[in-house]
Image (cartoon, rainbow, N blue to C red):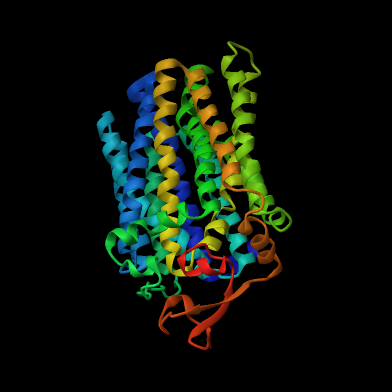
Amino acid sequence: MLTVLRNRTYRHLFTAQVIALLGTGLATVALGLLAYDIAGADAGSVLGTALAIKMVAYVGIAPVIVAAADRLPRRALMAGADLTRAGVALLLPFVDQVWQVYVLIFLLQSASAAFTPAFQAVIPDVLPKERDYTQALSMSRLAYDMESLFSPALAAALLSVVTYNWLFTGTVIGFLGSAALVVSAVLPKQVQAATAPAASVRSSKTGAYAKATAGTRLFFSTPQLRSLLAMDLAVAAAGAVVTVNSVVYVRDFLSLSADSLALALGAYGAGSMGVALMLPKVLEKCSDRRVMLGGALLLPVVFAVLGVITAAHGGGWRWPALLGTWAAFGAACSLVLTPTGRLIRRAAPERERTAAFAAQFSLSHGAWLLTYPLAGWVGARAGLGWAVAALGVIALAAALLAVRLWPAGTRQSTTAAVASRRGHVHEHEHAGLPAGHPHVRGARRAGAGWRHSHHHFADELHAAHS
């Protein structure tokens, strides 16, 4: 897996991601403790609202950025977003009112909504080979897991000598380091969208609205990507209970110390990391569909276990059981999230890749917009048991819907996936595309059209070849 780090550009981008995530992890722990200081037992409600505001920024900002992304240098876009996040994080230690938390979270996450889709879309250009890209996806998942595992541990160590407000300083350093590494990376030349002939409805729409919604239209027109949205909802249900209610479970339900919060979040990261490390080998033998749907169906089972723990009124077994449950949540979520980039890459033509990743980023976080406040508000008003029940029902319904939306016989889930692993591609012709069109770059002339081969794409350009 580490062989992809020999690529200098990817190595710089991956290191930037790790450093930024480490800083974000410190901020996550600090924000939970800050919310507890401000609101006490209602900390879950404060966090739920703050994270809902984060999702509003993600859902609303990402498509707008994509509409202008073709005219913005990707390196400048990512570095500028990092500098904005560093500036906002610098203000967080001075917060003493709930409304201030909400405003700064919106600004911080608006910058993240610009950075993340651009970062995700550039990696397939840096690593065009399928095997390298699959390894990079696992490395990216591993980076998130390392953040979940090591940043809480670092936070616990720092909390033994400083107050939690100093953790935000680590966040600032992380974003500044990420910006410096992004600037030092030499990115591949950006593919510009070109206007296609009138026969292609998608390519002929060049307005800002069409650009902003191109990725969303691709998602809703492709069975596998519709299933992915349902799986994202199941993952969001699990992630919400971990992110929002961990501080309530640790500090209020189990009456443990602040550093135990870091340990709980670390358990989630450990479970996810274990899966990310083994998935490259697993995906060589199993289809994306089998792996991802398996993870989605595992989540309701874990919720049932959490319900038993939450219903218990005492016993020293509850703390280790909670750690195991958090690790299981992390493992199941990783089974869904790690192969996501492969699925999107196969479904989206190169010229629409940024739009597709931005759509996934925006639409998936729309699910978090539902689950974050639900976890916080229901937990604060009705108790943790009702929050677990509500989110567990959502996870079960979403997992079953995902199975229904992605039938076993779907071409891309079986034939195309196996063909991709064996190096097989689909050869076909395009008639009427101009010589300068990005999709036929490198293709050979075939009469009045162009002939080339690649993995199956589910868009209007390839409707005749499906």
Residue 32, image x, y percentages: 41, 31
Residue at x-position 53% and y-position 69% = 464
Residue 423, image x, y percentages: 68, 70
Query: Residue lying furthest top in this view?
Result: 313
- Whether residue 263 is visible to the viewer of this picture, yes or no, is no
Residue at x-position 32% and y-position 66% = 205
Among the 4 quarters of the image, the one containing residue 307: top right
Query: Residue lying furthest right in this view?
Result: 285
- Whether residue 385 is visible to the viewer of this picture, yes or no, is yes
Residue at x-position 37% and y-position 72% = 193
Q: Left or right: where does residue 247 sit relative to residue 466?
A: left
Q: Is residue 257 above or below residue 207?
A: above
Residue at x-position 66% and y-position 42% = 294
Among the 4 quarters of the image, the one containing residue 6: bottom right
Residue 267, image x, y percentages: 60, 35
Give the number of callouts: 0
Q: Is residue 435 above or below residue 172?
A: below
Residue 354, image x, y percentages: 42, 62
Location of the N terminus by quadrant is bottom right
Q: Is residue 114 above or below residue 427?
A: above
Location of the C terminus by quadrant is bottom right
Q: Left or right: where does residue 457 sit relative to residue 370?
A: right
